[in-house]
Image (cartoon, rainbow, N blue to C red):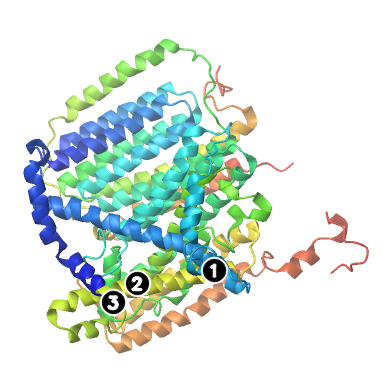
């Protein structure tokens, strides 16, 4: 049997990878991809806790997280398209109009 | 005949002799490899499924090969031609000839193509098409590779990944027509997948399980096919299935007169044939799902009675034989329908295709969920149907009620579709023609022709 | 080490490898690919735990829908690869890997001793159980989610719409 802590460690590692990606990548699409990775790390922890506690709430929360992720991807990519149309770049450092 | 009987009974008893074989094998293998497994587990979960997968692959690949021949033959009959008849008797060796031809052709990868994705795309297509075969029940309990209780969900999820192969193939070619074809076909597949998913929901009200084997058992325990209860759902499924497999009249992705060859224009030789195999495997899979969900899968009313007449030793084997035969006949019938449709209907326009998906099939599927659920609750309140531990029980009154209600529910759905699409001009060519003012027409009519 | 643990290690390697590849690969399309492999591994892990519905939903929603959206946008904008441009703070990139190790080490320490209350059973996450809970006790959050998705659809349409001249 696989102990709970293994799943949690995997989740932690995945989260760290995703976090690094969000900070390091300068292509906005790659950043969004890494964001999905972080969400999935949280999902894994939710499901693992839910299974090992014998409750269902964690899994239901994962379904909500998936819906939120879908909404986030939809709106985020729409913003990416709008951004690309106006500035012709996907570099997050280039879209700094609001910066002082 | 004798060999077939032997094969069927072997299918049934195989785990026994296989187990002893595996035990002997275990004695020969090093300890560190085998210490985690018992021979029984290894037989049941590794060796036996692998054997079944091998047999299944062989059968399906043969079926797919002959499906291409069938397509050409049927098209020839429809157009009053003879069709391929030179290679072998009646052209029966044509698939082999085609295969060899494609195999020894030069494998061209375009210079500007993204080579990694270009090689990966057909593989994704093919893998996604073949994985689905694992959960299809082609006979009673031991005659399916595996029986998982999310079978239908598994099929939906894998086929949703299969689109990726097409879209990547088109993108990696780095050429205009493949890209257009890939965009078209993936948009089409994604939108029709939604319709398929929704129409399956209404079927689930009666099956009460996602397991493919459980769906067949549900029909077996009632003694009816679900097409009687779910006629509108079946129609929606059939239309979406044709669109999902990118076949005519929905074959805009590879419309040869508009787009050269669609997403696989740049593919040649064996890679092209892999896409081709995946496409035809998808056809087989979709027809198998339709047969399982709506036409009773391997179940035919009366087969249990026939089996009961035989001596007990042959009962299981006879059941399997009848089941496999019935299943292949049903699949074959639906496949023939697909081919027939292809050579009968003209191709849709792209806007018509999208409109059909989102404004006709989706509302129909949604309305059908509501209607079927209402009918089911009504039947339950009237005491016509009972649910005992997830299995439905009903007498003949219940069956008649659900059949009549199922067919009658076509009318409210049609009324709804009419209400939604009353002002739509997509399918009304006369309206389309007259609403465009003469002055703004791009194409001027030639002088001799009167304007409509 | 049991057979299940071996399977876990295999799938975990798939998940982590996919994740690392997402960060390392320059081409966003390859990144999306790697992410899909990672999701497939995660889905296998869910099924191993007994959360079958989540496992299937993972593939349908993430690999089938969300990643398809990403691939569509990548194709639409024709992003070939990241521009070869030196990042402004290059030393920060080199700092990232040690910091990630530090973060995962900290999280590791936090969760290493956690024990589950009970052993997982194969029935823990069947479609029936998830569906019943979602449709009865947790109906309100479920319905609110659908409102959120509707909002997202309208918002995405409005944002991506080309303005009329």
Say which residue appears at 53% left-offset and 41% top-offset: B106
Instruction: Mark 1: give few (<14), some (14-19) or many (20+) Cα within 10 Å.
Output: some
Residue lying farthest top? C91
**Residue C124, x across and y down, in percent:** 19, 53
Q: Tell me which label, 3 or 2, sits earlier in the chain.
A: 3
**Residue B428, x across and y down, in percent:** 70, 69
Vertical order, B209 against B372 (above or below): above
Mark 1: secondary structure = helix
Vertical order, B434 against B318 (above or below): above
Residue B304: which quarter of the image? bottom left
Q: Chain of mark 2?
A: B
How many marks the image carries: the answer is 3
Mark 2: secondary structure = helix
Say which residue appears at 34% left-offset and 57% top-offset: B58
**Which mark's residue is nearer the viewer, 1 or 2?**
1
**Mark 1, residue position:** B73
B165 displayed left or right of B53: right
Mark 3: secondary structure = helix
Q: CA distance from mark 1 to mark 2?
A: 23 Å
A85 displayed left or right of B207: right
**Which mark's residue is nearer the viewer, 1 or 3?**
1
B330 displayed left or right of C157: left
Residue B77: which quarter of the image? bottom right
Q: Tell me which label, 1 or 3, sits earlier in the chain.
A: 1
Q: Are marks 1 and 3 in contact (CB under 8 Å)?
A: no
Q: Tell me which label, 1 or 2, sits earlier in the chain.
A: 1
């Amino acid at each position: 049997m696989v102990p709970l802590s293994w799943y949690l460690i995997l989740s932690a590692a995945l989260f760290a990878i995703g976090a690094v990606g969000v900070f390091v990548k300068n292509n906005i699409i790659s950043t969004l991809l890494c964001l999905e990775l972080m969400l999935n790390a949280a999902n894994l922890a939710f499901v693992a806790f839910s299974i090992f506690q014998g409750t269902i709430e964690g899994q239901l929360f994962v379904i909500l997280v998936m819906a939120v992720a879908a909404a986030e991807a939809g709106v985020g990519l729409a913003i990416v398209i709008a951004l690309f149309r106006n500035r012709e770049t996907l570099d997050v450092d280039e879209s700094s109009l609001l910066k002082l | 005949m004798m060999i077939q009987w032997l094969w069927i009974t072997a299918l049934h008893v195989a785990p026994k002799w296989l187990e002893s074989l595996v035990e002997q094998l275990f004695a020969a293998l090093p300890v560190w490899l085998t210490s985690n497994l018992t021979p029984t587990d290894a037989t049941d979960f590794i060796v036996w499924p692998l054997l079944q997968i091998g047999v299944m692959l062989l059968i399906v690949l043969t079926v797919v090969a002959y499906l291409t021949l069938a397509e050409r033959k049927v098209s020839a009959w429809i157009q009053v031609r003879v069709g391929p008849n030179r290679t072998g008797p009646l052209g029966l060796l044509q698939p082999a000839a085609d295969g060899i031809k494609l195999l020894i052709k030069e494998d061209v990868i375009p210079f500007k193509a993204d080579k990694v994705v270009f090689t990966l795309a057909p593989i994704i297509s093919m893998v996604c098409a073949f994985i689905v075969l694992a959960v299809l029940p082609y006979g009673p309990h031991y005659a399916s590779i595996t029986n998982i209780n999310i079978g239908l969900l598994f099929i939906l999820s894998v086929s949703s990944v299969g689109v990726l192969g097409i879209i990547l193939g088109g993108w990696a070619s780095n050429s205009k027509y493949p890209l257009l074809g890939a965009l078209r076909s993936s948009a089409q597949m994604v939108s029709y997948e939604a319709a398929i998913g929704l129409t399956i929901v209404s079927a689930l009200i009666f099956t009460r399980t996602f397991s493919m084997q459980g769906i067949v058992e549900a029909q077996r325990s009632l003694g009816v096919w679900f097409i009687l209860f779910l006629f509108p759902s079946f129609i929606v499924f059939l239309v979406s299935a044709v669109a999902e497999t990118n076949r005519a009249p929905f074959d805009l992705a590879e419309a040869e007169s508009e787009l050269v060859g669609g997403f696989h224009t740049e593919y040649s030789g064996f890679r092209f044939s892999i896409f081709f195999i995946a496409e035809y495997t998808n056809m087989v899979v979709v027809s198998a799902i339709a047969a399982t969900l709506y036409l009773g899968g391997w179940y035919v009313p009366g087969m249990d009675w026939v089996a009961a007449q035989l001596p007990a030793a042959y009962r299981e084997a006879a059941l399997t034989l009848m089941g496999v035969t019935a299943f292949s006949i049903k699949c074959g019938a639906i496949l023939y329908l697909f081919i027939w449709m292809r050579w009968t209907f003209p191709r849709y326009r792209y806007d018509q295709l999208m409109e059909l998906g989102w404004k006709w099939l989706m509302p129909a599927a949604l309305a059908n969920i509501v209607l079927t659920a209402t009918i089911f609750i009504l039947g339950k309140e009237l005491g016509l149907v009972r649910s005992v531990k997830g299995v439905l029980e009903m007498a003949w009154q219940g069956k008649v009620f659900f059949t009549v209600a199922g067919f009658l529910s076509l009318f409210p759905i049609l009324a709804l579709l009419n209400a939604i699409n009353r002002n739509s001009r997509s399918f009304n060519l006369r309206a389309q023609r007259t609403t465009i003012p003469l002055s703004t027409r791009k194409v001027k009519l030639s002088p001799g022709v009167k304007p409509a | 080490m049991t057979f299940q643990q071996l399977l876990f290690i295999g799938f975990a390697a798939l998940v982590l490898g996919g994740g690392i590849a997402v960060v390392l690969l320059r081409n966003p399309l390859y990144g999306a690919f790697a992410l899909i492999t990672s999701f497939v591994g995660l889905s296998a892990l869910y099924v191993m735990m007994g959360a079958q519905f989540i496992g299937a939903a993972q593939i349908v929603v993430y690999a089938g829908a969300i990643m398809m959206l990403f691939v569509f946008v990548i194709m639409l904008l024709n992003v070939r690869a990241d521009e070869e441009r030196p990042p402004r703070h290059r030393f920060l990139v080199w700092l990232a890997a040690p910091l990630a190790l530090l973060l995962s080490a900290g999280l590791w320490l936090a969760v290493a001793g956690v024990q589950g209350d009970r052993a997982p059973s194969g029935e823990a996450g069947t479609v029936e159980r998830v569906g019943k809970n979602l449709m009865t006790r947790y109906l309100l959050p479920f319905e609110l989610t659908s409102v959120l998705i509707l909002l997202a659809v309208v918002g995405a349409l409005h944002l991506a719409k080309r303005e009329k001249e």
